[in-house]
Amino acid sequence: MKSLNLHAHLKEHFGFEKFRPNQEEIINAILSQNDVLAIMPTGGGKSICFQLPALILPGITIVISPLIALMKDQVDSLKANGIAACYINSTQTNDEQQQHIEGLTNNSVKIVYVAPESLSYLENAFNSIQISLIAIDEAHCISSWGHDFRPAYTNLGYLKNRFPSTPILALTATADKATRTDIAEQLNLQNPNVFVASFDRKNLSLEVRPAIDRVKKIVEFIENKPNEAGIIYCLSRKTTEELSQKLQEKGINAKAYHAGLNPAVRAKTQDEFINDDCLVICATIAFGMGIDKSNVRWVIHYNLPKNIEGYYQEIGRAGRDGLPSETILFESYADVIQLQKFASEGLNAELQLAKLERMKQYADAQSCRRKILLSYFGELVTENCGNCDICKNPPTFFDGTIVAQKALSAVTRLQQKETLPVIVDFLRGSKNATIYNNQYQELKTYGIGADISWFDWSQYIIQLINLGYLEIAFHQNNRLLLTPLAKKVLFENEKVQLSKVIKKEIEKVVPTEK
Ligand code: ADP
Ligand code: ZN
């Protein structure tokens, strides 16, 4: 075989001077007929990994992708680079599909994109075409352990049996270690070469804020950067619409985007965003999959994401050009409750709840957030990042044993029946209706915490929740319960480290807003 100059191909067909990390290694592994599992962050440059080999290999490259909406764009841009490509999916008429399949059989195409649902249309053609490479994009969709399981992907395992000598390239941006193993097994990859590009995106700042007054904070944030494009991710379609409305009332040209809007409106909004005609999109997670806009300067999560994979993928849409970009996550207990409900009613409840718990721990973290994120993806770093809110504003700890003992004994005195605000009122000796109606003023320890402000108490109690001494009974009016750990503090004099309260804002602990 004549020696291939991959760089020359990269330059000639794609106009790039050099490979991004792992691209060249992945391409070489494919050209040596290996199965490959490639994990690269969003924007890492996955497409080149199959597009370039497709040009070199003698037969056809099949690209399986769930993103039907993007196939046309991808194929158009390949054609613009002089690469013969087509796609087959359910948006086409039978005639169109037939026409494309003929294109495959008479060898006039190098790359065909196909939705997993439409793969069966190719069954007849399979007998008369040479398939040199099968690329499976968004490969985590095959795993019910991942965060975006799609039933149509489950059948793809048959491809290895059907084409035993054709290399398979599985690509994903979002696999934790368990999901990676599952992908390789489900696709029957044979001794795959596994490439994991670093997930570190140093140019993204990380910040978590309590969700109180979210809208006001967002308006201020955007007003400070009037010419920058950003995305605000929301949990529900309704929130995207309400939020964009509120921002518009403040003179911000924001638009909603979700899968329930009519396709023409969606396409228009997407175009306006890409062309910088509309700078702010309030979107559900339906927005952004594959949108190639390099200058997104910020990403805000209005609601807590379901899991770290989704969160990381979404913030990854900022700063693809490598320039500094900001990300803010608003954390609210109301969201946690909502998400716990969704997770416990859905597929793989236990696993999804565990992933949600990791997400919550991230948001509550008191140490470098990037370290936590990267360790989630299996990358161990020793240095703090310097570009997250914790690194920039490290908490100072103090011996909070007495504070903790007071709070936990208040919970005990109130028979674990009360919510956080009532417990704080009790500690501070407040004279209000709830206290008097229940004659709490008669109880021992009433008012033992009058020296600490209401706000600080609420923050300490939230820390005690995060540290596992207290838990919120989400299904019982959010009253606070003692955990077994609390006994150690109350009766065994276990020491508790609390961090000094710095942020002068408080999160509502009662789930009132959505
Ligand atoms: P992913 O699918 O991993 O999110 P893409 O394949 O869409 O990423 O690539 C992201 C962007 O990076 C695209 O604009 C692409 O043209 C660009 N890109 C890919 N490889 C290179 C490279 N070697 N040099 C410069 N730009 C690249
Ligand atoms: Zn950090």
Image (cartoon, grey):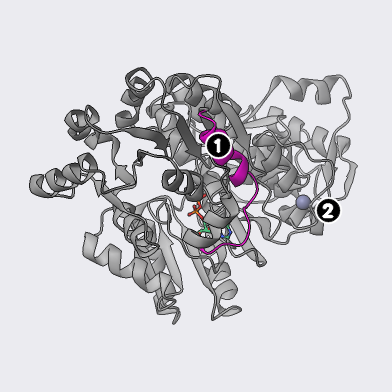
Residue 213 on image: x %, y %: 55, 64
- At a point 48% along the width and 63% down the height, the residue shown is 231
Residue carrying label 1: 38
Q: Is residue 35 above or below residue 243?
A: above
Closer to the camera, 451 or 306? Answer: 306
The circle on residue 394 is 2
Residue 86 on image: x %, y %: 27, 50
Q: Is mark 1 on a helix, strand or loop?
A: strand
Query: For residue 17, which quarter of the picture?
Result: bottom right
Tell me if 406 is positioned left or right of 285 in this view: right
Give the mark nearer the N terminus: 1 vs 2: 1
Residue type (three-letter) at the residue carrying disc 1: Ala
Residue 37 on image: x %, y %: 53, 32
- At a point 86% along the width and 38% down the height, the residue shown is 497
Q: In this view, does 424 lie above or below 218?
A: above
Closer to the camera, 428 or 18? Answer: 18
Residue type (three-letter) at the residue carrying disc 2: Pro
Q: What element carries label 2?
A: loop
- At a point 42% along the width and 22% down the height, the residue shown is 165
Q: Over which residues does the magenta segment extend? A: 15-33
